[in-house]
Image (tube, rainbow, N blue to C red):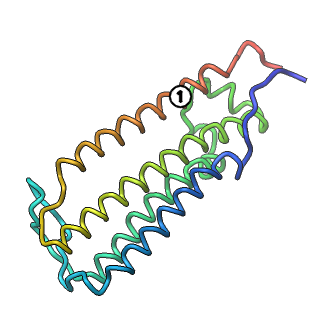
Amino acid sequence: MTNEPTTRQGWGAIRGPLLLTLGISVALILRVALVWSELPENMASHFGAGGRPNDYMSKVPFFWFLAVSAGGSIALVFAAATTLKRLPARWISIPNRDYWLATDERREVAMNRIAAPMAWIGLLTAALLAVAVEFTIKANLQGTNFANDVFIVMMVGYLLLVTAITIWMIRDLARLANPSDET
């Protein structure tokens, strides 16, 4: 038996972030349901400089578009590792690719090591989108501008965290692989 790296498998690798993401989604649905009747029929759906509304759409298509685009984006992030498992090795670019993809066991470990950080990125994406929706709801309910200044700070924080997670994931795969340990 070699001393090869292991990791939590499948559901265990993404359970926490996935459950939190589902919680954010349920909270967002409840929030929209609670204020639905108070929202204007023609909602501000896009905001320009200074958070001023510059485009409008009726609320039903707005929330359908939001559900499909935001939900789809988050689902794609969570599905990335599963999709990678099915791709031919030549299409996968990870550190020490030849080591990680040499055996089915190593490939499984690598994909699970990718799944967990991707799940955290999915959670961060859901949180950022939930904040954007909340700011949009408040702007429409109160007839005010979108909170651009706060959202920009949050967006920068999101981008920094996603970058840090990505760097950690790449370094993790590079650090754990020991190509001289081939069996």
> In which quarter of the view is residue 98 placed?
top right
- Left or right of 159 in this view: 4: right
Q: At 48% across and 45% down in the image, what residue appears?
A: 121
Q: At 78% across and 18% down in the image, what residue appears?
A: 182
Q: Is residue 164 above or below residue 15?
A: above
Disc 1 packing (10 Å; few <14; some 14–19; many ≥20): some
Percent across and percent down for residue 16 are 62, 50
On the rendered image, what quadrant is the C terminus found in? top right
Q: Is residue 96 above or below residue 10?
A: above
> In which quarter of the view is residue 6 placed?
top right
On the rendered image, what quadrant is the N terminus found in? top right
Query: Disc 1 marks which residue?
Result: 170
Q: Is residue 92 above or below residue 72?
A: above
Percent across and percent down for residue 73 are 43, 59
- Left or right of 110 in this view: 48: left
Percent across and percent down for residue 154 are 30, 45
The furthest residue to the right = 1
Q: Secondary structure at mark 1?
A: helix
Q: At 78% across and 24% down in the image, what residue appears?
A: 4
Percent across and percent down for residue 85 are 66, 47
- Left or right of 103 in this view: 61: left
Q: At 73% across and 41% down in the image, what residue appears?
A: 8
**Closer to us: 87 or 54:** 54
**Closer to us: 79 or 66:** 66
The kind of residue on which mark 1 rests is Ile
